[in-house]
Image (tube, rainbow, N blue to C red):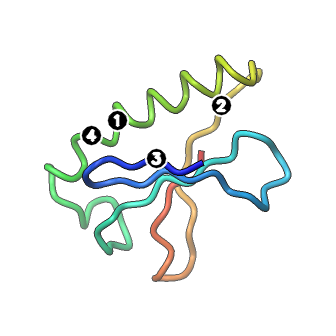
């Protein structure tokens, strides 16, 4: 699975143990959300809300966790 918007890319993490593990990445290189412009950040909330809704609809989990992971500077993704 791979979906994109103008500024964001959503991919299924194929090596994840749990179903529904998605990566949301900025198409612009940045190590922190605060490094991105307001125009780039504006669509992120609606994208995350849509992803959460679809995960709940398809998998019916007890909880959906949204968090930011990434230790290396070249990793710029948010794990869902």
- Please name which of the two marks, 2 or 3, marks the residue nearer to the observer: 3
User: Which residue corresponds to the image point at 35% horizontal and 53% vertical from the top-left?
Assistant: 8
> Residue beneath label 2, please?
64
Q: Are marks 4 and 3 in contact (CB under 8 Å)?
A: no
Q: With 72 as the anchor, is 19 left or right in this view?
A: right
* Residue pointed to by mark 3: 3
Q: Quadrant of the C terminus?
A: top right
Are discs 1 and 4 less than 8 Å apart at CB? yes
Label ID, residue 45: 1
- CA gap between label 1 and label 4 equals 6 Å
**CA distance separating discs 2 and 4:** 20 Å
Q: First in sequence, mark 1 or 2: give its number.
A: 1
Helix, strand or loop at label 3? It is strand
Q: Nearer the viewer, residue 10 or 76?
A: 10
Where, by quadrant of the figure, is residue 62 drawn? top right
Disc 4 crowd rating (10 Å Cα; few below 14, some 14-19, many 20+) is some
Q: Nearer the viewer, mark 4 or mark 3?
A: 3
Label 4: which residue? 43
In the rendered image of this protein, does residue 27 appear above or below residue 49? Answer: below
Q: Residue 31, labelled with which disc? A: none
In primary-sequence order, the first of circles 2 and 4 is 4
Q: Position of residue 63 (x, y in %)?
A: 71, 26
Of badges 2 and 4, the one in the foreground is: 4
C-alpha distance separating marks 1 and 3: 16 Å
Image coords of residue 15 (percent x, y): 79, 62
């Amino acid at each position: 699975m791979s979906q994109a918007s103008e500024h964001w890319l959503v991919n299924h993490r194929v090596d994840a143990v749990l179903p529904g593990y998605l990566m949301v990445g900025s198409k612009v290189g940045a190590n922190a959300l605060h490094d991105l412009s307001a125009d780039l950040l504006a669509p992120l909330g609606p994208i995350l809300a849509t992803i959460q809704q679809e995960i709940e609809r398809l998998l019916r989990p007890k909880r959906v966790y949204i968090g930011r992971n990434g230790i290396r500077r070249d990793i710029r993704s948010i794990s869902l």
